[in-house]
Amino acid sequence: MGLAGLPLALWLASTDDKAQTGSDPAPPVQRLPDASLPDLEDRMRSISEWSGRPLIINFWATWCAPCRREMPLLQSAQDSQSEGGLQIIGIALDTRKDAKRFVTENGIRYPVLYGEHEGAVFAESFGDAFVALPFSVFVAPDGQVVAQKSGELQPEELRRLIVQLDGRTQE
């Protein structure tokens, strides 16, 4: 291989199989770090507001096609699982204006926070699993990070991860 192929080879060598296959069964971050970001009404909100509940924190952007495809699935999960305490929180790596328009037009009712740079910094705090959007983090009520998923969630996969969260809730 010539020098021209070196950057690609280095990038391929640095990507990890877990990121390519999606779900990371042993998350590098064991506990949910706290962060504060504004909601779509520009009120500062802390992730700790939702402590004590099973959480799915979903990082997304309006320009991300897989993100847009999975949001109705997440809204459906929020609607059907909220009685069990599940809380989905969206983190838009986007502008407030773009995120608010998308959320309104698409009937997303779970809390959405935003921050282009700040949201990305929060996503990066979960370690190497954050390689692309969408990126979801599954957190037990005690703050334990149960799983992470880089890439679009599929319905069966989301159901399996929610069952895993429910199992952690029962402990």
Image: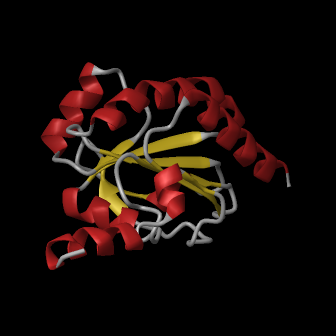
- Residue 101 position (above or below residue 7): above
Q: How many labels were placed on the picture? A: 0
- Which residue, as the protein is rendered here, is positioned at the far bottom? 3
Query: Which quarter shows the N terminus?
Result: bottom left
Q: Nearer the viewer, residue 88 or 14?
A: 14
Residue 33 pos. (x, y %)? 50, 70
Residue 86 pos. (x, y %)? 62, 40
- Residue 72 position (above or below residue 132): above
- Which residue, as the protein is rendered here, is positioned at the far right? 171
- Identify the residue at image location x=68%, y=30%: 83
Query: Which quarter shows the C terminus?
Result: bottom right
- Identify the residue at image location x=58%, y=48%: 55
Tell me: 87 left or right of 10.
right
Q: Nearer the viewer, residue 162 or 103?
A: 162
Tell me: 74 left or right of 157.
left
- Using the rendered image of the protein, determine whether residue 137 is visible from the camera's viewpoint: no
- Identify the residue at image location x=71%, y=35%: 84
- Rendered image quadrant of residue 35: bottom left
- Which residue, as the protein is rendered here, is positioned at the far front? 1
Tell me: 53 left or right of 131.
right
- Using the rendered image of the protein, determine whether residue 18 is visible from the camera's viewpoint: yes
Tell me: 131 left or right of 31.
left
Residue 66 pos. (x, y %)? 35, 35
- Residue 2 position (above or below residue 81): below
Colour logic: secondary structure
- Residue 46 position (above or below residue 110): below
- Rendered image quadrant of residue 36: bottom left
